[in-house]
Image (cartoon, helix red, strand yellow):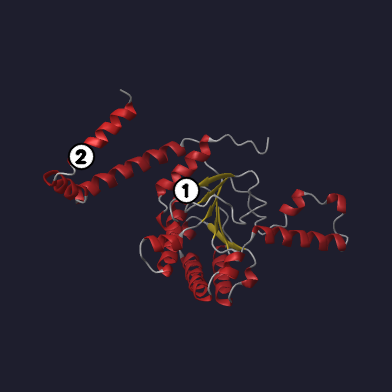
């Protein structure tokens, strides 16, 4: 008898036994008890520690980018207000930043607000998001974790399209961390990958018109130098949460050779274990850079 057959047999017997109240009641009580949750929690912690040890023994990515998707779906699944989902997403980013720093990964880039979001979301939701960005950026500017680890903070995108209060908060976070270089945290706001490439091409066209660059000298390196994120390397690993398996106009130029990892977990529920699993998946892959 194969393992799958044995497993199905045991499962069928267990389901049959649970029909009897004398068994189902104690089983239900035990599954919801503090003891059961304590065992599950301890098991998860042990598994996470083992995962952490494994990934630290292999080459870690230098640059991780995250498409933080699923705040609204998280809220709906928990019967919460939409704004609570966004707030939980903001708090999750703080946790993930700490996990990334613990692994000594130098670059973290996150997709917070796309140009499409600005055009598609209701003004009420956008105002709520802008409030969170303002609060979050000002918190980052004073965060001991940021300053003790010398994290440079920067925002990229069409920043001019954001409300003045968000632009002031961006400037505050950037000014307070401008002297740091050990780690770089980049938040993409009012960002679109196509728009970024268009802006870079416009700059090259202007330089060519002014005689600063010859036509034969225009190449991929010249475009890369004019991207919003020209001061950081291309991502090694891109993670997208919430089950969608697409890029959604994120870092289109930069992720030509990045490894992609998709998870069904909504962003506010993203755990340390989920991060480690994404990194381990990256480590198992053989990067070919188009070859």
Q: Residues within 10 Å of mark 1 (few under 14, many from 20)?
A: some
Q: How many marks?
A: 2
Camera-side mark, 1 or 2: 2
Asked where in the image residue 16 lies, by quadrant, the reply is top left
Q: Give percent across and percent down for residue 229.
A: 65, 57
Residue 236 position within the rendered picture, expressed as x and y whole percent measured from the top left: 58, 45
Query: In this orientation, which residue lies closer to the viewer: 275 or 16?
Result: 16
Question: Which of the numbered marks, if any, corresponds to residue 92?
Answer: none
Horizontal side of 77 relative to 242 (left or right) equals left
Question: Mark 1 or 2 closer to N-term?
Answer: 2
x 53%, y 75%: residue: 123
For the residues labelled 1 and 2, the Cα–Cα distance comes to: 34 Å
Residue 204, image quadrant: bottom right
Q: Is residue 174 left or right of residue 228?
A: left
- Residue 214: image x %, image y %? 87, 54
- Residue 117 at x, y percent in the picture: 57, 66
Q: Is residue 59 visible?
A: no
Q: Element type at marker 1?
A: loop
Give the residue at x 67% y 51%: 253
Q: Is residue 17 visible?
A: yes
* Element under disc 2: helix
Which quadrant would the C terminus be assigned to in this image? top right
Q: Nearer the viewer, residue 119 or 56?
A: 119
Compared across the picture, whether 289 is left or right of 93 comes to right
Q: Which residue carries the number 1 mark?
A: 263
Residue pointed to by mark 2: 16
Query: Furthest-left residue in view?
Result: 22
Residue beneath the point at 32% across and 44% down: 44
């Amino acid at each position: 008898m194969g393992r799958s057959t044995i497993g199905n047999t045991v499962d069928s017997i267990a389901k049959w036994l649970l029909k009897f109240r004398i068994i189902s009641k104690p089983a239900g009580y035990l599954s919801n008890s503090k003891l059961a949750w304590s065992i599950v929690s301890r098991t998860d912690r042990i598994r996470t520690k083992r995962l952490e040890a494994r990934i630290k023994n292999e080459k870690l990515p230098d640059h991780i980018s995250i498409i933080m998707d699923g705040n609204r779906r998280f809220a709906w699944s928990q019967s919460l207000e939409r704004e609570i989902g966004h707030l939980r997403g903001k708090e999750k980013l703080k946790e993930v930043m700490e996990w990334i720093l613990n692994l000594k990964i130098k670059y973290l880039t996150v997709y917070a607000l796309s140009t499409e979001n600005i055009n598609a979301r209701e003004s009420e939701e956008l105002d709520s998001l802008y409030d969170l960005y303002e609060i979050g950026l000002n918190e980052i500017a004073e965060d001991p974790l940021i300053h003790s680890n010398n994290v440079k903070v920067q925002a990229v995108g069409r920043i001019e399209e954001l409300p003045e209060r968000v632009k002031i908060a961006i400037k505050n976070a950037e000014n307070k961390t401008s002297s740091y270089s050990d780690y770089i945290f980049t938040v993409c706001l009012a960002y679109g990958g196509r728009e970024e490439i268009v802006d870079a091409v416009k700059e090259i066209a202007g330089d060519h018109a002014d005689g600063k660059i010859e036509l034969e000298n225009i190449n991929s390196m010249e475009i890369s130098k004019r991207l919003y994120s020209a001061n950081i390397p291309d991502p090694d690993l891109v993670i997208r949460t919430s089950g969608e398996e697409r890029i959604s106009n994120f870092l289109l130029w930069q992720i030509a050779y990045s490894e992609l990892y998709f998870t069904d977990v909504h962003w506010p529920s993203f755990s340390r274990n989920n991060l480690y699993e994404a990194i381990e998946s990256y480590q198992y892959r053989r990067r070919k850079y188009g070859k």
